[in-house]
Amino acid sequence: MAAEQSKKWILMVTAQTPTNIAVIKYWGKRDENLILAINDSISVTLDPAHLCTTTTVAVSPSFQQDRMWLNKKEISLDGARYQNCLREIRARANDYEDEKKGIKISKNDWQNLHVHIDSYNNFPTAAGLASSAAGFACLVFSLAKLMNVQEDNGRLSAIARQGSGSACRSLFGGFVKWVMGKEEDGSDSIAVPLADEKHWDELVIIIAVVSSRQKETSSTSGMRETVVTSALIDHRAKEVVPKRIIQMEEAIQNRDFPTFAQLTCSDSNQFHAVCMDTSPPIFYMNDTSHRVISCVEKWNRAEGTPQVAYTFDAGPNAVLIARNRKAATLMLQRLLFHFPPNSDTDLDSYVIGDKSILKDAG
Ligand code: DP6
């Protein structure tokens, strides 16, 4: 192998990927191994300045095995999800040459070269802020750059999906749809961009961190239990979501905030309703989350037209999407009034960001 001529070289790529928040939720799989969803979903990708994963991947002939560190702690790469992503990327690797550094790696060399992966989240891991979405999207994107993979982000999204379903949507900025697909091998289960981050740039996203503690039920096991035990999930996946997907796409294209807000809030509420309908029931939201919902609902009603949409993933933290900067400022004032800092009901923190696009820092 040409790459073994010198054991001294090391090749490195760094990438940064923001997380995404679903406004029409993915909940339930039809294939656990390939991670194929039972319904389409739509999300908005956040600004990487606030919630993102930064991953550095390195390869060197001196590395003895694949290794990974997450937030500075070494973690195992043995799980099927990591192995699937690594295998799929290696299968698509291409020749690489850097004459100046004397590095020459042929397509086949990648099968025997080991990688070291260093990943860091700038937000609480596994607290319902879609950390696995940013994490696997960044892992796949950076490995693809390192191994000179020539596929577009749509094809890469099908690989990131095998790390975590929601990760496929973080390969694009702006509004993104994950098409559930029909094929058994998952080849048509990919993310497609609906509108880029400039399309609706008045929107402002506020994340009210109700709790940064790790959630008790992971999304993976929660949705598995829902699919097996909920009497409502089938109706949601087959009847409700397909209609909402069409309406949501239209609302996004027309920048129709009242429809967007109504669909976003309803879909979040229905997702938590199917969690409650699971046996044993899953409670991701807590009293503070419910109070945030009441606060937004009352204000929207008082204004006569929605100013803010709320959505909650598999955790108690509120994601609030304000129609513009003025509404965001008023929303923050309201949150500070209802949840005063250093009181019994204060929030852990606020994060404010605009929508944004995947940034390649490689
Ligand atoms: C509530 O993508 O974390 O955030 O595919 O098992 O890794 P796995 O689950 P994950 O589930 C995300 C669920 C959600 C809704 C969404 O992001 O669409």
Image: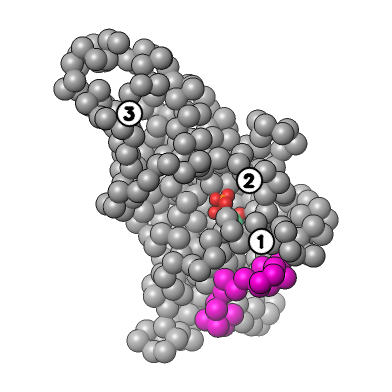
| Residue 69 shown left or right of residue 255 in the figure | left
- Residue 11 position, x and y percent, is 26, 26
Residue at the image position 50 percent from the left and 41 percent from the top: 80
Residue 35, by quadrant, is top right
Residue at the image position 66 percent from the left and 72 percent from the top: 280
Residue at the image position 41 percent from the left and 65 percent from the top: 351
Residue at the image position 27 percent from the left and 30 percent from the top: 64
Residue type, label 1: Glu
Secondary structure at badge 3 equals: loop
Query: Alpha carbon of mark 3 to alpha carbon of mark 2: how far?
Result: 27 Å
Q: Which residues are magenta?
A: 273-292
Q: Which label was assigned to residue 32?
A: 2
- Residue 155 position, x and y percent, is 57, 30
Query: Alpha carbon of mark 2 to alpha carbon of mark 1: how far?
Result: 12 Å
Query: Alpha carbon of mark 3 to alpha carbon of mark 1: how far?
Result: 36 Å
> What residue would you read off at disc 3?
114
Residue type, label 2: Glu
Is residue 343 positioned above or below 215 on the image? below
Q: Residue furthest bottom?
A: 344
Secondary structure at badge 1 equals: helix
- Residue 298 position, x and y percent, is 64, 82
Secondary structure at badge 2 equals: loop
> What residue would you read off at disc 1?
225
